[in-house]
Image: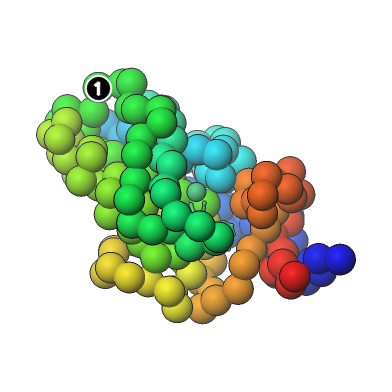
Amino acid sequence: MAQLTPLLSAQDIEAKVAAVARKISQDYKDSELVVIGVLNGAFIFMADLVRHIEKPVGVDFVRVSSYGSGDTSSGKHRLTKPLEIDIKGKDVLIVEDIVDSGLTMDFLKAYFQNFSPRSIEICAMIDKSQRRETPISIKYVCHKVEEGFLVGYGLDFDENYRSLPGIYTLKP
Ligand code: IMP
Ligand code: MG
């Protein structure tokens, strides 16, 4: 039986998301902000985050599949849902559930760059640092961990646990 150890409660998450959203609202107060969520993992975080940002924002989603096995990404990425709104000249904020190797964020930043936005930054619910393979600057982070496999609040293991309101460490 897999074992779930609580890491962040729904209340912890709410406070962290609100704090990051406050910072985003200040930093982008005079700009045209487009928030782009990475499916599927970011859908819950994205929904909470945009409701805490105190200004109008454009919203879109992309979906990326990475080839490879197990729980690590291989570095070969393919878009299975492309960007659909116009980001030319706009400030893009990529919203991701968890940054691990950093390769997905590297791939997406390069992809968005093709559409000539004014800026691209990253907002991650979780920054998991130990397995980072490429240096990646994450401007907004709700919570940092070194290692471990996390589930809940959008994060899944084989499509399980996404709907849990809190975040847990999964032990096989
Ligand atoms: P990476 O940064 O390219 O290695 O990949 C990040 C993606 O891997 C995330 O968007 C998740 O889909 C998945 N991932 C990495 N670590 C975890 C975890 O602890 N729990 C759930 N998914 C994870
Ligand atoms: Mg993901």
Kind of element beneath mark 1: loop
Q: Amino acid at mark 1?
A: Asp
Task: Please state, as top left, top right, bottom left or bottom right, where the C terminus lies in the image.
Answer: bottom right
In front of the other: 64 or 164: 64
Instruction: Please determine whether, in this image, residue 40 is positioned above or below residue 24.
Output: above
Image coordinates for residue 15, horizontal then vertical, percent: 62, 57
Q: Residue 73 occupies which quadrant of the picture? A: bottom left
Task: Please state, as top left, top right, bottom left or bottom right, where the N terminus lies in the image.
Answer: bottom right
Say how many tags the image has.
1
In front of the other: 63 or 36: 63
Image coordinates for residue 44, horizontal then vertical, percent: 61, 41
Position of residue 106 in the picture relative to residue 54 (left or right): left
Q: Which residue is mark 1?
A: 86
In front of the other: 172 or 148: 172
**Label 1 residue near ligand 2, CB within 8 Å:** no
Position of residue 54 in the picture relative to residue 4 (left or right): left
Q: Residue 64 occupies which quadrant of the picture? A: top left
Q: Residue 70 occupies which quadrant of the picture? A: bottom right
- In percent of the image, x 74 and y 43: which residue is there? 163
- In percent of the image, x 48 and y 62: which residue is there? 72
Image coordinates for residue 113, horizontal then vertical, percent: 17, 40
Image coordinates for residue 19, horizontal then vertical, percent: 52, 57
- In percent of the image, x 26 and y 69: which residue is there? 135
Instruction: Please determine whether, in this image, residue 121 is positioned above or below residue 118.
Output: below
- In percent of the image, x 74 and y 50: which residue is there? 161
Rendering colour mode:
rainbow
Position of residue 33 in the picture relative to residue 13 (left or right): left
Position of residue 140 in the picture relative to residue 12 (left or right): left
